[in-house]
Image (cartoon, grey):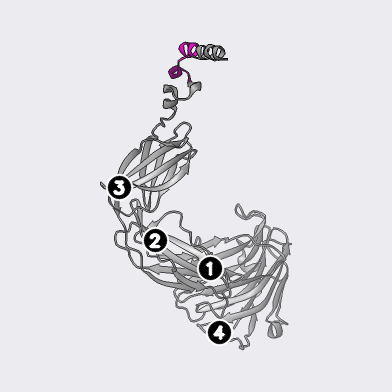
């Protein structure tokens, strides 16, 4: 047995001489293993200073499992900010205190080994003062937030939360530093909204109110709760046949008018060709070219919508669908008027085209006064003998229908060239 052990030991010594430990990685401790323990430093580290944040980018380190990200102010000590996956090669810092030079560093981590740091230094602006919120007001189905100017700010970011949720940034980019208000037209009735503001500058952000200002939106806009000098509202449904027909609410004087309603138009401008849409016509005067048209959005035939048209003293005309403002226009000829006529209208384009316009729950406000109990009179201004207005249910149900088929036009006339000959019109007084 002793002789056998000596022979086996001799074989091991012979094998070691042929294959030294220092040159064979299978034996675990040679120079090749030491090379594996060296982790490459991330290359091409760039820091881009934006309004409100600093963005870091670097080149991927082969085999990296993670990256450590650090920041230090001036000659101070590094603070570890984040650990990101090895597949990530960018990171955004929104927490820098600002006010001087800051150095960012990135290290690669591989198999538990950490590389040396790659660094880049940038000068960041002084941190803006937290904006002081002034007011959150509700008007015309919109919430308006106002705040005071913040020292050192170059812009502002707006955050919103809905009914007790979390704050979410609603401005993709900062508002200009001269802007000290934000109006949100997307709010909905019976929902509660909170808003807060954060000031930004080069690479930095201010603190912000964690509670913000909060307000609940009331029921949809109606003649009772919408500021105006003149208003008309109704439940409106449009049907018809042919190339074009509409049902409208109208406010007018002898020389100017604005109207809002539902229109089907086979020849409408794209993308409204052969479609039904809500339509606004703003007639600034009877002169050619003084008529503006807009279509806030698509609508549907044979469907009832609650429409409202309002006129303010300054000539601001506003248009609502189901309690939500969908557009506005300015008509100075309707400003400061004491006798604006309020009408409903049903029209069609050509001989043979028909319209069926139904108006119910009609309500009217004149000279800043709305009286729910007032009994209004009607006057029939219908201009086409083929169209008839029926007011028999107006006293009992505040309902009017305008129906019929256009006739009497020449072959060259339509509702553009002979508008005064194609309508059924009821005026209230």
Name the N-terminal-most of marks 3 and 1.
3
Does the CB distance between marks 4 and 2 fall below 8 Å? no
Q: Are marks 3 and 2 in contact (CB under 8 Å)?
A: no
Instruction: In this rendered view, identify the residue nearer to me: 288 or 332.
Output: 332
Per the model, the C-alpha gap separating discs 3 and 2 is 28 Å
Mark 4 or mark 1, whichever is nearer to me = 1
In the rendered structure, which segment of residues is drawn in magenta? Answer: 13-24
Between residue 343 and residue 115, name the one nearer to us.
115
Gap in angstroms between the C-alphas marked 1 and 2:
19 Å
Say which label, 3 or 2, has the lower sequence index. Answer: 3
Residue 146 magenta-drawn? no
Q: Earlier in the sequence, mark 4 or mark 3?
A: 3
Side of 397 relative to 279 (left or right): right
| Residue ID at (59%, 80%) | 364
- Residue 19 colored magenta? yes
Q: Is residue 262 left or right of residue 171?
A: right
Whether residue 340 is visible, yes or no, is: no
Residue receiving disc 2: 198
Q: Position of residue 25 (x, y in %)?
A: 48, 21
Q: Which mark is residue 402?
A: none
> Where residue 388 sits in the image (x, y, percent)?
72, 74
Residue that carries the numbered disc 4 in the rendered image: 370
| Callout 2 secondary element | strand
- Residue highlighted by disc 3: 77
Q: Helix or strand or loop: what does disc 3 sit on?
A: loop
The residue carrying pointer 2 sits among few (fewer than 14), some (14 to 19) or many (20 or more) residues within 10 Å by Cα, namely many
């Amino acid at each position: 047995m002793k002789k056998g052990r000596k022979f086996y030991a001799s074989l091991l010594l012979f094998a070691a001489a042929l294959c030294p430990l220092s040159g064979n990685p299978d034996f675990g401790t040679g120079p090749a293993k030491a090379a594996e323990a060296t982790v490459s430093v991330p290359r091409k580290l760039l820091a881009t200073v934006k309004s409100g944040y600093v963005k870091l980018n670097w080149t991927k380190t082969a085999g990296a499992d993670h990256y450590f990200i650090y920041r230090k102010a001036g000659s101070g000590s590094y603070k570890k900010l984040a650990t990101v996956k090895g597949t990530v090669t960018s990171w955004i810092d929104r927490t820098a205190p600002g006010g001087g030079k800051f150095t960012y560093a990135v290290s690669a981590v591989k198999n538990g080994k950490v590389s040396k740091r790659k660094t880049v230094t940038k000068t960041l602006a002084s941190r803006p003062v937290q904006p002081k919120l002034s007011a959150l007001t509700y008007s015309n189905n919109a919430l308006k937030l106002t705040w005071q100017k913040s020292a050192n700010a170059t812009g502002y970011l707006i955050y919103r939360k809905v009914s007790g949720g979390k704050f979410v940034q609603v401005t993709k980019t900062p508002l200009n530093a001269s802007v000290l208000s934000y109006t949100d037209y997307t709010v909905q009735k019976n929902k509660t909204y909170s808003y807060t503001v954060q000031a930004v500058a080069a690479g930095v952000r201010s603190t912000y109110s964690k509670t913000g200002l909060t307000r609940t939106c009331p029921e949809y806009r109606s003649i009772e709760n919408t500021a105006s000098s003149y208003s008309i509202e109704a439940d409106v449904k449009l049907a018809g046949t042919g190339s074009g027909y509409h049902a409208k609410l109208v406010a007018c004087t002898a020389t100017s008018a604005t109207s809002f309603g539902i229109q089907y138009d086979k020849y409408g401008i794209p993308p409204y060709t052969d479609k039904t849409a809500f339509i606004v016509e703003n007639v600034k005067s009877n002169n050619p070219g003084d008529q503006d048209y807009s279509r806030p959005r698509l609508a549907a035939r044979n469907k009832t919508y609650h429409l409202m048209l309002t006129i303010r003293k300054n000539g601001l005309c506003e248009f609502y669908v189901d309690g939500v403002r969908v557009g506005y226009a300015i008509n100075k000829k309707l400003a400061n008027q004491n006798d604006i006529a309020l009408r409903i209208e049903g029209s069609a384009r050509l001989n043979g085209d028909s319209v069926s316009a139904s108006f119910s729950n009609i309500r009217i406000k004149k000279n800043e006064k709305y009286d729910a109990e007032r009994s209004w009179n009607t006057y029939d201004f219908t201009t086409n003998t083929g169209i008839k207005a029926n007011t028999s249910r107006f006293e009992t149900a505040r309902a009017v229908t305008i129906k019929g088929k256009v006739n009497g036009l020449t072959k060259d006339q339509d509702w553009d060239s002979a508008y005064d000959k194609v309508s059924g019109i009821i005026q209230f007084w």
